[in-house]
């Protein structure tokens, strides 16, 4: 019923920095948390063999491999849950959903939880960090030549995007957002009201715009670092773990979650293990919301069940291309 896909990379480097996060979550029972909610779970690790990894070339090789893995999971009737070092994995995830459903004309909406907007482009970034352009690339604003190489890629309309909890946004990024139709829910609003109340009007508008299925993206630095620190880019004023879990339930009650992801966890900054527990609890929450009973409230179809405990490995050959190792800031 679920496929757990791990991309242990950060800026093209395997198991480095935030690339350690997916492995850490797996080693501490991510799949078992899902099985405890009643799921058969297939585990897959996606890797790119490269003697000389580059940020851009390796990242897009991963996106292509992830798109293939997500397509296969959805075609088998399984919900994909992605654990990734970088947010730009969303390119592969959403593309894979589309590739698996070529005859479904309904748009894939995006609900993006993040301390950052990830809406820079190569022309606006001052850090050169590819991951700070993830949502911009997903909505077709940049890297068009590279995104065209991802099976199933088609730009998501920014009118179908909800940005939740962003609070560390560059000036140029803010300008791009103001010119877009991206809907925003501020962290301060979520701290002042229950998740359902804070999101109600925005999710109603998203549905009015024709969205019935969504990709749920959770950059773990949406959390307030005072409660649980995800990485070196964490920004004060974020959400509590309980609020983020509540958000999952609110979204699942309104939309089909076509795929979900947890990203940007660097265990080095989680010295007390609070983010580890928050992440595992989120994984369990997503599992609960993707049970047959919950999905049956929104869907009329079903999928094939597989044997629990299966492990797969996806490997992709990188194409030519390059990039620099990312700096610490977005």
Image (spheres, grey):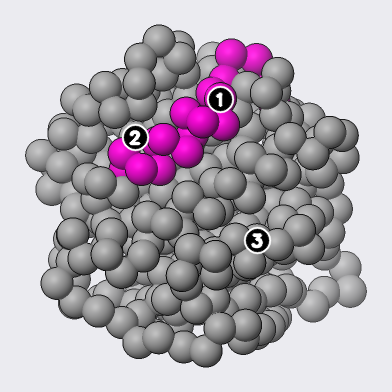
Query: Which residue position holds label 2?
Result: 162
Instruction: Please state which of residues 192 and 63 is positioned toward the viewer in this rendering.
Output: 192
Residue, x 14% and y 72% (percent of image)?
300
Residue, x 47% and y 28% (percent of image)?
243
Is 307 magenta? The answer is no
Give the image location of residue 295, x and y in percent: 27, 63
Instruction: Please state which of residues 115 and 24 is positioned toward the viewer in this rendering.
Output: 24
Q: In this rendering, would 37 be left or right of 294?
A: right
- Crowd class of label 3 (few under 14; some 14 to 19; many from 20; radius 10 Å): many
Helix, strand or loop: magenta stretch:
helix
Query: Which residue position holds label 1?
Result: 240
Q: Earlier in the sequence, mark 1 or mark 2?
A: 2
Residues under numbered marks 1 and 2 in contact, where contact means CB atoms less than 8 Å apart: no
**Disc 1 versus disc 2: distance between alpha carbons?**
19 Å
Residues under numbered marks 1 and 3 in contact, where contact means CB atoms less than 8 Å apart: no
Query: Which residue position holds label 3?
Result: 30
Residues under numbered marks 3 and 2 in contact, where contact means CB atoms less than 8 Å apart: no
Is 250 magenta? The answer is yes
**Disc 3 versus disc 2: distance between alpha carbons?**
27 Å
Residue 18: image tag? none
Q: Earlier in the sequence, mark 1 or mark 3?
A: 3
């Amino acid at each position: 019923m679920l496929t757990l896909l791990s991309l242990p990379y950060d800026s093209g480097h395997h198991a480095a920095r935030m690339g350690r996060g997916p492995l850490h979550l797996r080693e501490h029972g991510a799949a078992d948390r899902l099985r405890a909610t009643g799921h058969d779970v297939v585990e897959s690790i996606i890797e790119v063999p490269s003697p000389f990894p580059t940020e851009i070339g390796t990242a897009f090789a991963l996106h292509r491999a992830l798109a293939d893995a997500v397509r296969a999971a959805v075609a088998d009737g399984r919900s994909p849950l992605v654990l990734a070092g970088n947010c730009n994995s969303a390119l592969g995830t959403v593309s894979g959903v589309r590739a698996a459903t070529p005859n479904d004309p309904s748009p894939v909406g995006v609900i993006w939880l993040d301390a950052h907007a990830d809406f820079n482009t190569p022309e606006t970034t001052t850090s050169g960090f590819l991951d700070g352009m993830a949502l911009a690339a997903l909505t077709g604003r940049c890297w068009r030549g590279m995104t065209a190489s991802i099976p199933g890629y088609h730009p998501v309309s920014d009118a179908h995007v909800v940005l939740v909890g962003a609070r560390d946004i560059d000036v140029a990024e803010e300008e791009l957002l103001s010119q877009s139709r991206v809907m925003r829910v501020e962290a301060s609003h979520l701290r002042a009201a229950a998740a359902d109340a804070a999101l109600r009007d925005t999710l109603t508008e998203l549905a009015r715009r024709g969205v019935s299925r969504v990709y749920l993206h959770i950059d773990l630095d949406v959390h307030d670092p005072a409660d649980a620190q995800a990485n070196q880019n964490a920004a004060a004023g974020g959400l509590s773990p309980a609020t983020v879990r509540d958000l999952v339930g609110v979204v699942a009650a309104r939309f089909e979650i076509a795929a979900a992801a947890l990203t940007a966890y660097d265990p080095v900054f989680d010295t007390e293990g609070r983010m580890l527990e928050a992440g595992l609890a989120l994984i369990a929450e997503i599992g609960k919301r993707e049970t047959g009973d919950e999905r049956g409230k929104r869907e009329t179809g079903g999928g094939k069940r597989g044997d629990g405990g299966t492990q797969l490995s996806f490997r992709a050959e990188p194409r030519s291309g390059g990039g620099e190792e990312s700096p610490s800031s977005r």
